[in-house]
Image: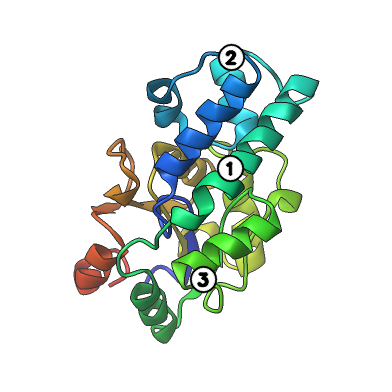
Amino acid sequence: MKYRGVIFDIDGTLVDSNEAHVRAWVQAFADEGLKVEAPQVRPLIGMGGDQLVPRLTGIEKGDPVYQRLSEGWKTHFLNDELKGLRPQPGVRALLETLQERGLKLIVGTSAEAALVDQLLEIAGARDLLPERTTASDVEASKPEPDIVQAAVHKLGLPAGEVLMVGDTPFDIESARKAGVDAVALRCGGDDRFDGAVAVYDSPQDWLDQLDRSPLT
C-alpha cells in the first residue's frame, strides 16, 4: 500500500459544523458593524480566520479589529453553535478500520487545542486521534501548507506516503502545496474538489468503498 499515514481535517469532515461556522462568522462581523452575509462567508469556510477575514474585509491579522472578530467568532461558535453539532456518518468505524490496517492517523488543524478536544469529543473520536496539530504548530492556516507540513512531520513519514482527508478545496490546495495527495468528502457541503485523488459522500461512504479506494 502506498500510503502509511492519514491526516484528517475536523470541521465538515469529522463533524457537521461548517454551517455553524458560517453563522458564527456572520454574527461576529455584525457585532463590529460589518455587513457580511452568509453567501459571502460560505465559500471560504475551510480557511482559518487569518485567511478568511482579510479576504472578506481587508482587515489583517495584526489589526485590533481582527482580534475582536476572531474572539467574536469563537464566542458565538462555542456558546451558540457547539451544542448542536453532530458527527458525520461513519466517523468512528472508519478510523477504527484504518487503525486496524496499520495506518498512522493524525488531525491536521489550526484550531486551539481546547476546541480540537471538544470537536473530537463530538465526533466520538478523541481516543482514536490523540495526535494532532494545533494553532501553536503553524504560522498560517489553509490553504497554506503549514498544517499539512506540520502533520507530516509529526507522523514521521515522507509526504508521498501520507493522505489528507478534507471537505473543502482549501484542504486539497494545502495538501498539494505540501506534496500530499487528498481525498475529499462531500458531507461538508462543498463540491469544488479539483485535484483530489478520490471523492466520497461521507466517512461512511469511503468506508463502504475502502477496498476500491486509494487505500487499497
Residue identifier under label 1: 145
| Residue under the point 40% across and 40% down | 19
Residue 63 visible? The answer is no
Q: Nearer the viewer, residue 179 or 51?
A: 51
Amino acid residing under circle 1: Pro
Amino acid residing under circle 3: Leu
- Please identify the quadrant where the N terminus is shown: bottom left
**3D distance between C-alphas at marks 3 and 1:** 18 Å
Image-based side of 60 in relation to 167, left or right? right
Residue identifier under label 3: 105
Q: How many marks?
A: 3
* Rendered location of residue 113, percent (x, y): 69, 58
Residue 200 lies, with reference to residue 44, above or below; the image says below
Amino acid residing under circle 2: Leu
Q: Nearer the viewer, residue 28 or 159?
A: 28
Tell me which numbered mark, 3 or 1, is placed earlier along the sequence. Answer: 3
CB contact under 8 Å: marks 1 and 2: no
Residue 22 lies, with reference to residue 1, above or below; the image says above
Residue 95 visible? The answer is yes
Tell me which numbered mark, 1 or 2, is placed earlier along the sequence. Answer: 2
Residue 40 lies, with reference to residue 212, above or below; the image says above
Q: Nearer the viewer, residue 80 or 46?
A: 80
**3D distance between C-alphas at marks 3 and 2:** 40 Å
Tell me which numbered mark, 3 or 2, is placed earlier along the sequence. Answer: 2
Which dot marks residue 34? 2
What colour scheme has been applied to the protein in the rendered image?
rainbow
| Residue under the point 56% across and 79% down | 127
